[in-house]
């Protein structure tokens, strides 16, 4: 039962502390759309998405009105396009037609983004996988709402280094194709290790082949709420600190659970999962970096930052998992640079480097996220950064991801403006030394010894 105190407390979190539901993401299977005729395939995809998602945005707006809970994004994720297009697509250009169909469906339904222009290649690439990957620069340059992801590694299979090397090239090509928009295409492209099937957050969302025909997944937010709660226990012990984070995460997740159940009931689509991540925005007071500062580090990146982030991530999960019957996706704390004002400030103060961010990804939800780097960074260096992050995910049995934006024509210290939730970022320096000989090796890095669990 919900009492009047809890209602007032939730209202305060929404009005004063930037609490919101970051996204309702409708996952849609396109497996029944598959056809060997490309034109028919695209027709099937458009019809399926626009039919199933016809009332998604309207339903989200009704929930916002009924409960006065901001729902920032309404999104769609679909079955990885590499699978869906395998029978019909003979070359990268054929896959681009699927991207344009997804974009048209997103516009018709009114959603903010559609994810699933994806390939899963942790153990190797089929010809169809490679065609989709090679189509990504054109697809992201010629669409507005399509997001793309490629899973190149897993704890069970190791890392496909051929795919990692190719993705280094693809990221640079995507940057070049969208250089007139500060290489914005790369903001819609993420490379994963251990990608989950039920992630509601872009750019990495896709509807896994293990999922049912359609599901509702919800991603919550609330860094501002956590920071405000920690202000009340400043200087207290770690025990008090942890208990405060857990209790706050529980309250935030309950809001997400309410929205998920209401959306499921109104749409007649089963509830999937709550992703109980702390997802920041560029708004002042809605920052994960500010939480770390409140825990006790002067800037994100200062000594102690990784330990503070590990504590935060763990307590968010412990508190949130009790608030929902199904928890999934990424769940924890995001540390994107451009989307978090506190992270931006830390970079400007020279407190936060790419190497420190990499260390922090060992204990956070995802990885190197929304980081602008110089546009003249070699593809092999980008691939090396990808490989490092894939290795962290593989060995630590966790999801890691990379969303790098090599901004063509800009160098270290210059600012890049993406707008909206994607914010802005200073271009960060990259280690100048080469890993080309390492990246040039063929094949894959084997799975770690602890992957053998059968």
Image: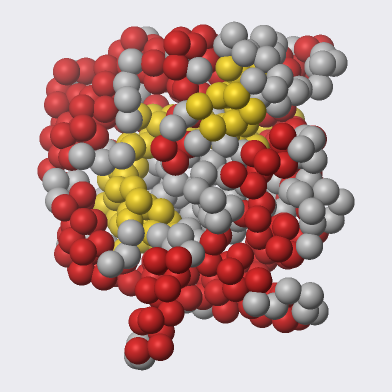
The answer to whether residue 185 is above or below residue 68 is above
Q: Is residue 413 something one can see in this rendering? A: yes
The answer to whether residue 148 is above or below residue 110 is above
| Viewer-closest of 87 and 181 | 181
In the rendered structure, the answer to whether residue 80 lies left or right of residue 355 reads left
In the rendered image, the quadrant that contains the C terminus is bottom right
Q: Position of residue 21 (x, y in %)?
A: 39, 59
The answer to whether residue 60 is above or below residue 74 is below
Q: Quadrant of residue 9?
A: bottom left
In the rendered structure, the answer to whether residue 28 lies left or right of residue 438 reads left
The answer to whether residue 43 is above or below residue 290 is above
Q: How many marks?
A: 0
Q: Position of residue 358 (x, y in %)?
A: 75, 39
Q: Is residue 29 something one can see in this rendering? A: no
| Viewer-closest of 453 and 136 | 136
Q: Residue at x 19, y 46 (%)?
A: 53
Q: Residue at x 14, y 46 (%)?
A: 54
In the rendered structure, the answer to whether residue 197 lies left or right of residue 115 reads right
Q: Residue at x 40, y 66 (%)?
A: 14
Q: Position of residue 3 (x, y in %)?
A: 36, 90
Q: Quadrant of residue 307?
A: bottom right
Q: Position of residue 138 (x, y in %)?
A: 40, 13
In the rendered structure, the answer to whether residue 144 lies left or right of residue 35 reads right
Q: How is the image coloured?
A: secondary structure
In the rendered image, the quadrant that contains the N terminus is bottom left
| Viewer-closest of 218 and 325 | 218
Q: Residue at x 33, y 72 (%)?
A: 258
């Amino acid at each position: 039962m919900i009492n009047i105190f809890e209602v007032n407390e939730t209202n305060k979190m929404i009005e004063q502390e930037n609490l919101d539901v970051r996204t309702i993401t409708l996952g849609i299977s396109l497996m029944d759309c598959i056809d060997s005729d490309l034109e028919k395939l695209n027709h099937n995809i458009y019809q399926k998405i626009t039919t199933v998602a016809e009332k998604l945005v309207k339903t989200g707006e009704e929930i916002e009105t009924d409960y006065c809970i901001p729902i920032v994004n309404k999104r769609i994720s679909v079955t990885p396009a590499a699978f869906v297009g395998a029978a019909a697509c003979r070359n990268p250009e054929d896959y681009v037609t699927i991207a344009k169909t997804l974009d048209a469906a997103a516009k018709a339904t009114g959603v903010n983004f559609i994810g699933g222009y994806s390939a899963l290649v942790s153990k190797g690439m089929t010809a169809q996988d490679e065609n989709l990957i090679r189509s990504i620069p054109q697809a992201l340059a010629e669409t507005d709402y399509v997001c793309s992801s490629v899973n190149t590694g897993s704890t069970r299979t190791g890392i496909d280094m051929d795919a990692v090397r190719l993705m280094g090239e693809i990221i640079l090509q995507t940057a070049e194709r969208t250089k007139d928009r500060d290489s914005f295409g790369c903001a819609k492209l993420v490379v994963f290790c251990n990608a989950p099937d039920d992630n509601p957050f872009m750019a990495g969302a896709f509807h896994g082949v293990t999922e049912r025909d359609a599901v509702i997944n919800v991603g919550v937010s609330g860094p501002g709420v956590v920071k405000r709660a920690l202000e009340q226990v400043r200087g207290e012990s770690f025990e008090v600190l942890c208990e405060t984070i857990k209790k706050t995460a529980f309250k935030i997740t309950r809001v997400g659970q309410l929205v998920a159940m209401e959306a499921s009931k109104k749409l007649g689509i089963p509830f999937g999962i709550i992703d109980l991540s702390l997802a920041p925005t560029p708004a002042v007071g809605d920052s994960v970096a500010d939480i770390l500062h409140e825990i006790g580090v002067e800037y994100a990146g200062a000594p102690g930052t990784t330990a503070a982030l590990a504590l935060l991530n763990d307590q968010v999960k412990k508190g949130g998992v009790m608030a929902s019957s199904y928890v999934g996706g990424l769940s924890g704390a995001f540390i994107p640079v451009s989307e978090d004002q506190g992270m931006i400030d830390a970079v400007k103060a020279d407190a936060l480097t790419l190497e420190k961010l990499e260390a922090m990804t060992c204990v956070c939800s995802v990885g190197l996220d929304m980081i602008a780097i110089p546009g003249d960074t070699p593809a092999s260096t980008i691939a090396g950064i990808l490989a490092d992050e894939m290795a962290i995910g593989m060995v630590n049995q966790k999801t890691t991801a990379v969303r790098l934006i090599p901004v063509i024509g800009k160098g270290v210290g210059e600012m890049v403006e993406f707008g909206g939730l994607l914010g802005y970022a200073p271009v960060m320096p990259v280690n100048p030394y080469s890993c080309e000989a390492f990246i040039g090796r063929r094949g894959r890095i084997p799975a770690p010894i602890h992957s053998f669990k059968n």
